[in-house]
Amino acid sequence: MPRTQKERNEQTRRALLDAGSSLLREVGYARTSVAQITQRANRAHGTFYLHFESKRDLVSVLLDDMADEARENIREIWSTAPTVDAIWLGVRAFLARITPNRSLWLLLEEVVALEEDAAPLRSRLRQQYVAPILRGIQNRSDELPPPVPNLELLADLVTSMSLYFARTGNLPASPEETALHITVVWCKAVGQPITEKDLDRLRAMFPTE
């Protein structure tokens, strides 16, 4: 059946995103032009501005898509798994999804370095990760002891650790062990009981060589 205009527009937008993503990762922000993106996407130059305001806007969409995927995956985990397991599985999934996209984080740093007014892009993206983590902390059981006074600060700390590890690739241990350390910090801060039995159970889920 013939495609609708909406479907054609979405296909063009997706082609531009894919072309932009590959070019930006290959040669960087400064050396990528809109003309190169449209040429690789096999689209007319003017179509770019029907979908994006600028090259930076395309980068912002790529980063938003990455954040959306990570949040959706964590949301599914937290809706089904036991509390301690869910924290660990969520953090591990978070690291697993954004670590392979390290090039996008490096791209963001290049954009901020080249364009002074791009700094809010980093802050907005960071908040996209802080918000769901904060909701996860706030949704703890009512039977738990009172949490730390500033839950947003805790969410920001957890996000900072995770993003630093993902962006730099400098995990202090395996992704599973790193996620376990963050889980312990999280549980202790909010008063979530975590026992040696819990830790043993989680370590039993680590992949074997």
Image: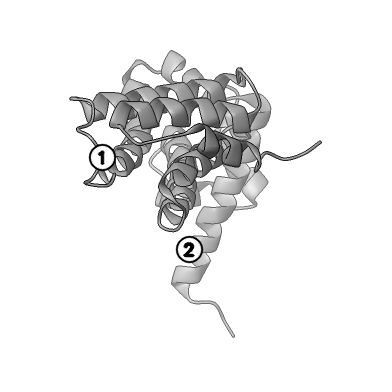
If the image is split into quadrants, where does the C terminus sit? top right
* Helix, strand or loop for disc 1: loop
Q: Position of residue 65 (x, y in %)?
A: 47, 46
Does residue 65 appear anywhere in the picture? no
Q: Position of residue 113 (x, y in %)?
A: 45, 14
Left or right for 148, reference 68: left
**Disc 2 marks which amino acid?**
Asn
Residue at 46 percent of width and 46 percent of height = 86
Q: What residue did someone put label 2 on?
A: 9
Q: How is the image coloured?
A: one colour
Q: What residue did someone put label 1 on?
A: 144
Q: Position of residue 129 (x, y in %)?
A: 38, 36
Left or right for 167, reference 23: left
Does residue 98 appear anywhere in the picture? yes
Give the Cα separation between the discs numbered 2 and 1: 50 Å
Q: Residues within 10 Å of mark 1 (few under 14, many from 20)?
A: few
